[in-house]
Image (spheres, rainbow, N blue to C red):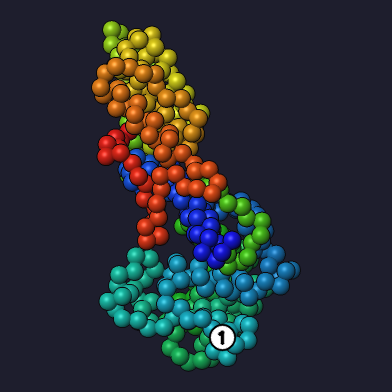
């Protein structure tokens, strides 16, 4: 084999790998026929497990992770312009674990959480995972005041539980002594913000919690929201035994429409096939050739473009011109777009690294 033949084989092999599947091709041509919902993964962690993780931080020597978590929560709940302190653990040389930096009023006045004063005033933040939190709080307040930097508030974060009575009395006493407001954020406050304000993902990442799991969910897009409402309404009509008295033809049409809505919603195949089978069963009772062919056409269309089932049957032959065109379209899809045998591409060419497909001028849409 010469070098030219080897290069041709290589190009052919690469081309086969890049060839789009029928579903990919149809979705590229008609994205409006497919679901526009978005899947997402949400963290799941029981609150008692989270409380226990906070309570046992020091046993695992995770004080640094706790400080990182507290700073992130403070940015989400109090003010977002916090400095990251460097140096030794426990505030380094600055006497505080974190503090805010000044920002323009035009920015802070547009905060929808916390207080705009966080953009102009200087606030001190202290984080502690010590079990004896009160002596640590008193020492941190004294340390903050010793800097004489003009702090207007002090926020103290602890992983311990502090009763409301003890928190209020301690805050009042230290506020009176320091001459500036002192606020205590204990484990209850942290857990409440994490679960009620949607910060569980942040907490799991910052605290490096390994016991968390993730649950997949789907956020409906605008088109799928409409389709879902239409499908529910259509199912209610189809289930009504009195609605289609003397109108069995319309019942078949509505069954087909419901199957197409389920297909656009990306429902499981057994549901879509079941809906088409119901339409086919009722259509056979009426025995109207044109309607039977339309049902078969939609089933074959769906099997090819959505599920890539190339063995789906073709509708039976009829003599009417529209039906013959439907049949010819299906046959061309089956013969010209089916997977190519190894070593050759069927009816496909590559132009500028983009795949195109040779098709008849009439390419009806389902």
**Residue 248: percent from left, percent from top:** 32, 11
Q: Please tell me in which quadrant of the rendered image residue 264 appears.
A: top left
Outermost residue, front side: 2
Q: Residue at x 42, y 40 (%)?
A: 337
Element assignment for label 1: loop
Q: Which residue is mark 1?
A: 86
Q: Residue at x 61, y 71 (%)?
A: 66
Relative to 146, residue 326 above or below: above
Number of residues whose C-alpha sits closer than 10 Å to that of mark 1, classed few (under 14), some (14–19) or many (20 or more): few
| Image quadrant occupied by the N terminus | bottom right
Residue 267 makes an appearance in the image:
no
Outermost residue, right side: 59
Please name whichever residue, 64 or 333, is drawn nearer the observer in this view of the structure.
333
Please name whichever residue, 129 or 262, is drawn nearer the observer in this view of the structure.
262
Q: Residue at x 51, y 81 (%)?
A: 84
Please name whichever residue, 194 or 165, is drawn nearer the observer in this view of the structure.
194
Q: Residue at x 68, y 67 (%)?
A: 57
**Residue 240: percent from left, percent from top:** 36, 15
**Residue 51: percent from left, percent from top:** 63, 58
Relative to 266, residue 312 above or below: above
**Residue 297: percent from left, percent from top:** 37, 26
Please name whichever residue, 74 or 349, is drawn nearer the observer in this view of the structure.
349
| Image quadrant occupied by the C terminus | top left
Residue 341 makes an appearance in the image:
yes
Q: Please tell me in which quadrant of the rendered image residue 320 appears.
A: top left
């Amino acid at each position: 084999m010469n070098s030219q033949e080897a290069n041709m084989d290589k190009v052919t092999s690469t081309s086969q790998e890049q060839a789009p599947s029928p579903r990919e091709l149809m979705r590229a041509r008609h994205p409006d026929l497919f679901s526009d919902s978005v899947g997402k993964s949400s963290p799941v962690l029981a609150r008692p497990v989270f409380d226990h993780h906070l309570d046992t931080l020091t046993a695992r020597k995770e004080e640094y992770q706790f400080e990182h978590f507290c700073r992130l929560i403070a940015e989400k709940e109090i003010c977002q312009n916090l400095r990251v302190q460097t140096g030794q653990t426990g505030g380094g040389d600055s006497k505080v674990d974190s503090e805010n930096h000044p920002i323009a009023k035009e920015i802070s006045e547009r905060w929808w959480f916390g207080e705009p004063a966080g953009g102009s005033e200087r606030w001190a933040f202290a984080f502690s995972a010590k079990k004896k939190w009160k002596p640590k709080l008193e020492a941190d307040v004294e340390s903050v005041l010793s800097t004489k930097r003009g702090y207007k508030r002090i926020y103290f974060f602890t992983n311990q539980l502090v009763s409301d009575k003890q928190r209020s009395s301690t805050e009042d006493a230290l506020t009176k002594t320091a001459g500036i407001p002192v606020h205590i954020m204990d484990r209850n406050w942290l857990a409440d913000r994490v679960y009620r304000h949607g910060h569980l993902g942040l907490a799991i990442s910052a605290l490096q919690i390994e016991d968390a799991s993730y649950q997949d969910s789907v956020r409906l897009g605008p088109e799928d929201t409409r389709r879902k409402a239409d499908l529910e309404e259509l199912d209610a009509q189809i289930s009504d035994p009195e609605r289609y008295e003397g109108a069995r033809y319309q019942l078949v049409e509505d069954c087909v429409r419901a199957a197409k809505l389920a297909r656009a919603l990306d429902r499981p195949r057994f549901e879509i096939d079941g809906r088409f089978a119901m339409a086919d069963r009722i259509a056979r009772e009426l025995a109207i050739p044109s309607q039977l062919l339309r049902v078969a056409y939609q089933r074959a269309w769906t099997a090819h473009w959505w599920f890539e089932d190339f063995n789906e049957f073709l509708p039976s032959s009829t003599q009417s011109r529209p039906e013959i065109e439907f049949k010819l379209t299906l046959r061309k899809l089956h013969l010209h777009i089916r997977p190519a045998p190894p070593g050759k591409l069927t009816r496909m060419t590559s132009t500028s690294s983009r795949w195109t497909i040779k098709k008849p001028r009439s390419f009806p849409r389902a």
